[in-house]
Amino acid sequence: MQALFVYVSCGESREIDVFSLDSRSGAISLRQRLLTSGSPVPMRAMPVQQRLYVGMRNDNALHAFAIKSDDGCLRSLGGVAAPGAPVYVYSAPASGVVFSSSYGDNNLSVFPLDVCGVPRAAQQTESGLPRAHAARVDQSGRWLLVPTLGADVIRIYRIGTAGRLVPNDPAVVAVKSGSGPRHPVFSADNRFVYCLNELNGCIDVFAFDAERGVLDLRQTISMMPPNFAGAPWAAELRLTGDGRFLYATDRRSSTIATLRVAKKTGKLALVGHTPTEETPRGMDVDPSGRWLVAAGQQSGALTVYAIDPVSGRLAAKGRQRTGKEPICVEIVAP
C-alpha cells in the first residue's frame, strides 16, 4: 500500500490529527493524535523538507513539526511568537522563509528559518492590511499575493533577498466591492491566478504577468449552488496538480463546487456541486489529483472523495471522525 499522509488541525480540541490514506482504495485511518499547546488553525506542509508549519491562534505563534518519512507522524521542533494571530501560512523554500497573515491583527509577517527549518523571530511585518486572509507565493518564488478581505484588494509583493518583501508597482489590484477576497492559487504554469471571494461566493480569474507581477481580471464566476438562497460564506480553494479541475468550498451551503479549467485561457466552467461535511472550512487535493479530503468545522469529521479523471466529479469513499473544530487539511505524498 502506498500511503498518503493527511493532516487536520483541530482548533477547539487543540490537536493535529494525522491520517493514513491508501492511494489505491481511498481507505483512511488514524495514525496519530498530537495535542498542541495552542489552538492550531492554518497549516502548510513542505514535503521535500519534511516539515509542517502550523499557526497557533490562541498563542499567536508559529510552530514547526518534523514529518516522519515512514508513517507521517509528527514531532515538534519548536516555535516562535507571531506579531498577529495566524490565519494562513505559506512557505517560500528558495528564500528560506515562512509567511503568516493575520486576519484579526491586519498584518503579514515574514519568518526566517534556521538550518533545521524552525522559524525564528519575524524579520518583517507589514501592517495596515485590513483582514489579511492569505499569503501565496507564485511558482517562480518571486511574487507574493496577499488578499485583504476588508479592503477588497489583493496586495502584490516582490520577494527579495532573504525573503524581504517589497511592494510591487502597482502594489494592489482591486476586486469588486463587497467581494471579500480570501484565498488565491496559481496555475502550475504560472499564467493564471484564481482567487476565491468569501463574501460574494465568486472566483476571480486573473491572467498573471510573472515578469512584472501584474494581475489582469479575465473572468468572474459564481461557485454557489444555483438554488441556494443564503448568503455565501466561501472558505477553501484547491487546484488539481494537472490544472484541469478547481474545487471550492462554501460553509453556509456545506457544498464543494467542481469547476473545469480551460488550459489555453484559464477560464472556468462550473461542473456541479457535492454536498459535504457541515461547514467545510478545510479541504485539500492529493498531488496525484485522485483524492480530495474535506473536513467539517461543525461536524467534527472528514470525508474522502474519489475524483473522476474525466469529469472531475466527486464520489464519497470513506469518512472518519476528527477532533473538535477541524480547520485546515493538508495532504502529503511521501
Image (cartoon, rainbow, N blue to C red):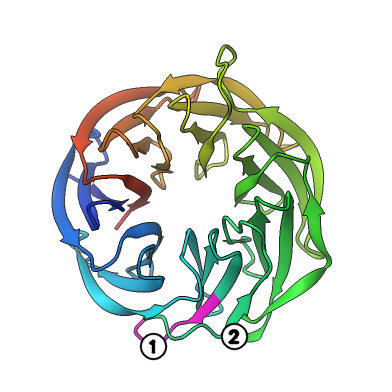
In the image, residue 122 above or below residue 248: below
Camera sees residue 268? no
Q: Is residue 250 left or right of residue 13?
A: right
Asked whether 90 falls inside the magenta stretch, the response is no
- The three-letter amino acid code for the residue at tag 2 is Ala
- Work out whether mark 2 precedes mark 1 in sequence or the reverse, and give the earlier one: 1
Asked whether 114 falls inside the magenta stretch, the response is yes
Seen from the viewer's position, the closer of residues 63 and 267 is 63
Camera sees residue 160? yes
Residue under the image location 18 percent in, 62 percent down: 35
Which residue is under mark 2? 162
Residue under the image location 34 percent in, 39 percent down: 297
* Residue 74 on image: x %, y %: 21, 65
Q: Residue furthest right?
A: 170
Q: Quadrant of the C terminus?
A: bottom left
- Residues shaded magenta: 110-117
Q: Is residue 302 left or right of residue 176?
A: left
In the image, residue 300 above or below residue 8: above
In the image, residue 208 above or below residue 298: below
Seen from the viewer's position, the closer of residues 126 and 58 is 58
- The three-letter amino acid code for the residue at tag 1 is Val
Which residue is under mark 1? 115
Q: Quadrant of the N terminus?
A: top left
Binning the other alpha carbons within 10 Å of mark 2 as few (below 14), some (14 to 19) or many (20 upward) gives few
Which quadrant would residue 46 be assigned to in this image?
bottom left
* Residue 135 on image: x %, y %: 58, 61
Q: Is residue 35 left or right of residue 213?
A: left
